[in-house]
């Protein structure tokens, strides 16, 4: 069984735009294990995505107490997260964030293949140094005026490194309107239908849906 790790810690809209990568991996490798490393404050969205086997939650905010690598947010410390990643023995780690931090976490997983974007498309160019395979979408760079494609298409293009060239454009199940989701940065459960968190999620989703006619 192939074991995949997706690294996309945040932010909310970017996590949403990365979900089709998980769906495409599941479509191409139905029996694979697909885990996702995410920031504690964005974990709730991924809890609603059925194609993911496990959500590995990291607390990237200062710890508020002592314990076995975890704090009140429910996320593990950086050191504890790296230990858990290495024990999982991933075959492939995919960094969709393109930061030095996310690239280091992907490489620290111990996966033989660590895939990310070329320096022109990584958010921090030095992240490229931590990848075994780098994908260059080919239009000059993330902020180049020639790059007009939707970020979902750019993310899916990265899977060509794995031989997936007809990636599924799928949000792995649309979050129902009115769903209650508790976020770390909220004081209580939030009704997604009426809250600003919902607005941010649906803005990202509807942008994708309009572009891809779903």
Image: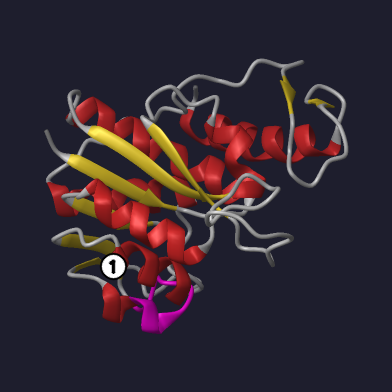
Front residue of 104 and 210:
104
Front residue of 175 and 168:
175
Q: Is residue 41 left or right of residue 98?
A: right
132 is within the stretch colored magenta: no
Indicate the quadrant containing the N terminus: top left, top right, bottom left or bottom right.
top left
Res. 104 image quadrant: bottom left
Q: Is residue 110 left or right of residue 213?
A: left
Question: Element under label 1?
Answer: helix
Q: Residue at x 53, y 54 (%)?
A: 68
Res. 95 image quadrant: bottom left
Q: Residue at x 82, y 27 (%)?
A: 189
Front residue of 19 and 101:
101
Q: Residue at x 77, y 15 (%)?
A: 178
Query: Is 104 placed above or below 112 here?
Result: below
Query: Is 81 placed above or below 126 here?
Result: above
Q: Residue at x 46, y 72 (%)?
A: 101
Residue 11 point in image, percent of width and height = 62, 54
Look at the image and tell me whether residue 42 can be seen. yes
Q: Dot 1: within a 10 Å radius of its alpha carbon, few (fewer than 14), some, or many (20 or more) residues?
A: many
120 is within the stretch colored magenta: yes
Magenta stretch, main secondary structure, is loop
Front residue of 32 and 197:
32
Look at the image and tell me whether residue 137 can be seen. no
Residue at the limit of the structure toward the front, as seen here: 67
Segment tinted magenta in the rendering: 119-127
Q: Write down the residue under mark 1.
A: 107
Q: Is residue 127 left or right of residue 157?
A: right
């Amino acid at each position: 069984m192939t074991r995949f790790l997706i690294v996309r810690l945040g932010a909310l809209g970017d996590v949403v735009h990365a979900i089709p990568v998980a769906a495409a991996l599941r479509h191409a490798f139905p029996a694979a294990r697909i885990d996702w490393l995410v920031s504690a404050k964005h974990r709730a969205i991924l809890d609603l995505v059925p194609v993911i086997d496990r959500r590995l939650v990291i607390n990237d905010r200062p710890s508020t107490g002592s314990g076995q690598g975890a704090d009140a947010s429910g996320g593990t410390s950086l050191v504890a997260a790296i230990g858990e990643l290495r024990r999982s023995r991933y075959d492939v780690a995919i960094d969709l964030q393109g930061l030095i931090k996310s690239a280091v976490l992907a490489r620290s997983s111990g996966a033989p293949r660590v895939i990310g974007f070329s320096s022109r498309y990584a958010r921090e160019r030095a992240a490229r140094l931590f990848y075994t395979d780098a994908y260059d979408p080919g239009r000059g760079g993330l902020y180049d005026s020639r790059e007009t494609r939707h970020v979902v298409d750019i993310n899916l293009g990265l899977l060509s490194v794995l031989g997936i060239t007809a990636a599924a454009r799928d949000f792995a199940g649309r979050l129902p309107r009115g769903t209650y989701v508790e976020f770390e940065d909220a004081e209580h459960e939030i009704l997604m239908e009426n809250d600003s968190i919902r607005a941010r999620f649906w803005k990202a989703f509807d942008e994708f849906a309009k572009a891809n006619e779903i």
